[in-house]
Image (tube, helix red, strand yellow):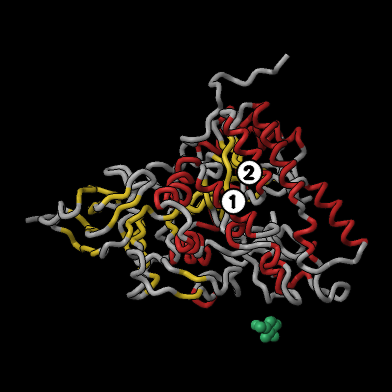
Amino acid sequence: MAIEYDLLIVNGVVVTDTDIQEWDVAIKDEKIAKIVPRGGLKNAKATKTIDAQGGYVMPGGVDAHVHLQEPPLFGKGSTADNYETGSRSAVCGGTTTMVTFAPQKKTEDTLLDTLYATHERAKNNCYIDYSFHLLVGNPSERALSEFKTLREEGISSLKIYMTYEALQLHDGQILDVLLEARKQGITTMVHAENGQVIDWMTAQLEKRKLFAPKYHGSSHPPLAEVEATYRAISLSEFMDTPILIVHVSTPAAAAHIKAAQDRGLPIFAETCPQYLFLTKQDLDQPGFEGAKCVCSPPPRESEADCDVIWEGLADGTFTILSSDHCPFRYNDSETGKKSSINDEYPLGHFKYIPNGCPGIETRLSLTLSANRLDLKKFVEVTCSNPAKLYGLYPRKGALVEGQSDADINIWYAPGQMETFELKNEMLHHDVDYTPFEGRTVKQWPRYTILRGQIVWDKEHGGLLGQKGYGKFINRDASSLAKPLKEEEWQLPL
Ligand SMILES: *[C@@H]1O[C@H](CO)[C@@H](O)[C@H](O)[C@H]1NC(C)=O
């Protein structure tokens, strides 16, 4: 009998956002060809067969919040990972698609040049499939006029900031962006923190000569996030334009989001492992150590805050769980965390510590190991919803016969993998630490498959994928985020 399939996965438990079933999977020409009840492919001929040994078979991870190779935002800090090392780290942790940022500076007029320059950085360098969110630093008339072309170029989302001097937009500019995004069917991501509150708090701390890394947390009070979140929701409602609030960390911000969703507004939200696993204590470490966990928003007060964020994932307040991988090396005084140390501030100054943590490789395993989410919910927030939200579904984030790319993680059956303590030396990023050092890991992908190719085999060689195999994926409009009314926005008179 002729070979019918490229790869079979048998004896697994298929988990999608809607099903947990003992199903076998057949792959052909980079796609999911068939999914049938266990044993149904017994007579099928394939080039290769993997016995999943009762382990979970899930769609490959989709990480929709990744910073790679961006120009400095915080003094001298520049992101440690480039497209090669960042995507390598991703695939070794089971993420097969990433959406990174193409950052436009305030001094630049055009978004298209930003897009093309980012393509150059990514081209032939990626281990996994990718797309970009345009990061709008300057919504000039020209930039706004380019949104239509962005859609033609396969880009259906962008991000704006309500903080950071280098990127902060004022409310009028935000309305400009939302109106044009609405017209073009683009989803707008919002970093919701009130930049002026943060600057004011920073000045208060400086007056008192409080510079240690832990004061990064004090300088970003929950109020700054809560107010900006509510303001972003209000601007979105006024424009009837969907938004996604990125990296939500605060219970009170989550409550505003939930209330808006309960009113039927197209408000979506993201959280990240930092806000599930880290607290203020991780910032309050001896010497400069706390700098490892400086990110924005900062880890919050206590585990009770983390519990609320977990609940928000479970109850649907948070649409997606992303890494916000934004890596800076720790022991690097040129471009890393220690670039904030100088003669004037021998123990560093929190204000100059580059904001961000690595996490693209640990997102899936840490979350699954915590065993706090229903398995279907885990797939929903880490794979399916990011794909739906950003116009990649069902090609990504799903296992649909004939439609989905064969992007798959084969995990272990519960208890089948030996538990280990996470150590940075196990990871594949170009960063000298992980904020999750020492955490207990009970799950890691045994195999990761990208468009039918085995790119990770934990027990036999680890990374098997090739740099350059990952390709740019054209995205459609979001299938989740839509205005309530289809007709054009009217000036309320
Ligand atoms: C930190 O970097 C300095 C300068 O490059 C080097 O001398 C030192 O050994 C490094 N320390 C650690 C712990 O890696």
Identify the residue under disc 1: 309
Q: Is mark 2 in CB contact (under 8 Å) with mark 1?
A: yes
Classify the position of ligand 1 by quadrant: top left, top right, bottom left or bottom right: bottom right
What label sits on residue 41 in the rendered view?
Answer: none
SS assignment at label 1: helix
- Determine whether, in the image, residue 405 is placed left or right of residue 318: left
Q: Which sits earlier in the primary sequence, circle 2 or circle 1?
A: 2
Residue 373: percent from left, percent from top: 46, 53
Q: Quadrant of the C terminus?
A: top right
Q: Residue at x 40, y 49 (%)?
A: 376
Q: Residue at x 49, y 62 (%)?
A: 370
Q: Determine crowd level at label 1: few under 14, some 14-19, many 20+ residues with C-alpha closer than 10 A.
A: many
Residue 76: percent from left, percent from top: 74, 65
Residue 388 occupies quadrant? top left
Which residue is more in the foreground, 185 or 124? 185
Looking at the image, the residue that sits furthest to the top is 493
What label sits on residue 254 in the rendered view?
Answer: 2
